[in-house]
Amino acid sequence: MAEIGIKVEKYSSIAAVVKVLRDYSSMSISDIKAAIEKNDYVYTGSSYEDGELEKIIDCYTRLTQSGTAVQLYEDGDGISFEILLNIQQRNYEISNEVEAEEELEQDDTDIEVLEPFSYLWEEEFDDWVVIKDENGYSIYNTETQSVLLIEDEDLNNKVAAMMVMQGCEVCSGIAGWPYEDYSEDDFNRAVEFVEEYAESLGAKYICTKREKFTTFSGEKHILEINQMRVYQYKDEYFWVESHFLPDKPFMVMTFGDTIETIFDDADPFPYDLPEEELKAEVRYSLGIEPYPEN
């Protein structure tokens, strides 16, 4: 069992730090201040306990949003936030595989009964995902956005479990717009503004690529299906994608050496910045100007 810890390296407001930490820890204000001064952990949890990792991720995100510089550790060694997300993904995959194996072991499943559905994890592997929620398993086609109806519930669960064991994507649901107080149309217009400004700086539209993204919302694993507009700037390719934080939506320009390797995020930024600030974020992301020092 690995211990994940958070240390505060620099802060602009101790009140903001305390406000966030008091939602996750019973530490007093004086204890929080002492931990920061001693370079000790202000919050810890297990990477394998249900719910604890999600709280650490949420705490880290809120602290960074408050302008606090923090460092993550796993068993005393510094790690990045990306590694933390990878741990979360690994835990989710292991849990799904264990449950799927248990499902297939029930009643000594006859593999031949599943053979008519083998196209789900063979020929059409990229088009199908398993939705696993409180109601059980559903089999969903991301291309047609429809559910495969298998009337026999036991057979449905066995087919879905086999899909999981064959490496098919698993999620808790399909993403919709997650905010009530922010407009999806306004967000999309901001993305178009950013893309058009990038083009004015020399970026060239290449193609539109259908992409599946999986993100966590609390303990739920949500699948996003987006049509990503791919651009080229100098010798790099990029697209502009959503970055849904708990408080409000951000966007981020993501880069790669090829269209198939667009993985590296620049710094995310709020979609509702004034136009001149949005333009500045584009220049920072493209490397035209350096990010300002805090």
Image: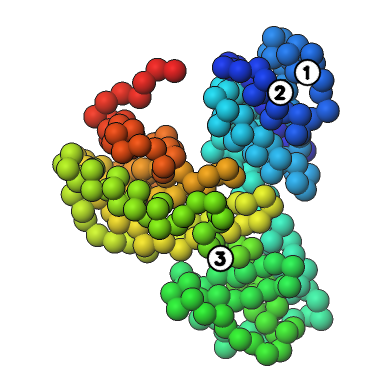
Image quarter of residue 106: bottom right
Do labels 2 and 1 touch, CB within 8 Å?
yes
In this rendering, which labeled residue sits more in front, label 2 or label 3?
A: 2
Image quarter of residue 155: bottom right
Q: Residue at x 53, y 63 (%)?
A: 176
Q: Is residue 51 above or below residue 29?
A: below
Q: Earlier in the sequence, mark 2 or mark 3?
A: 2
Q: Earlier in the sequence, mark 3 or mark 1?
A: 1
| CA neighbours of label 3 inside 10 A, class few (<14), some (14 to 19), many (20+) | some
Nearer-the-camera pick, 174 or 180: 180
Residue tagged by mark 2? Answer: 18
Residue extending farthest top: 37
**133 displayed left or right of 279:** right
Q: Amino acid at mark 1?
A: Ile
The residues bearing labels 2 and 1 have C-alpha atoms spaced at a distance of 7 Å
SS under mark 1: helix
Residue tagged by mark 1? Answer: 29
The residues bearing labels 3 and 1 have C-alpha atoms spaced at a distance of 40 Å
SS under mark 2: helix
| CA neighbours of label 1 inside 10 A, class few (<14), some (14 to 19), many (20+) | some
Residue 12 placed where, x, y %? 57, 17
Circle on res. 174: 3
Locate the C terminus and report the quarter of the image it occupies: top left
Nearer-the-camera pick, 141 or 11: 11
Image quarter of residue 61: top right
Q: Is residue 152 above or below residue 22?
A: below
Q: Is residue 78 above or below residue 203?
A: above
| CA neighbours of label 2 inside 10 A, class few (<14), some (14 to 19), many (20+) | some
SS under mark 3: strand
Question: Number of marks in the image?
Answer: 3
Q: Residue at x 33, y 61 (%)?
A: 209
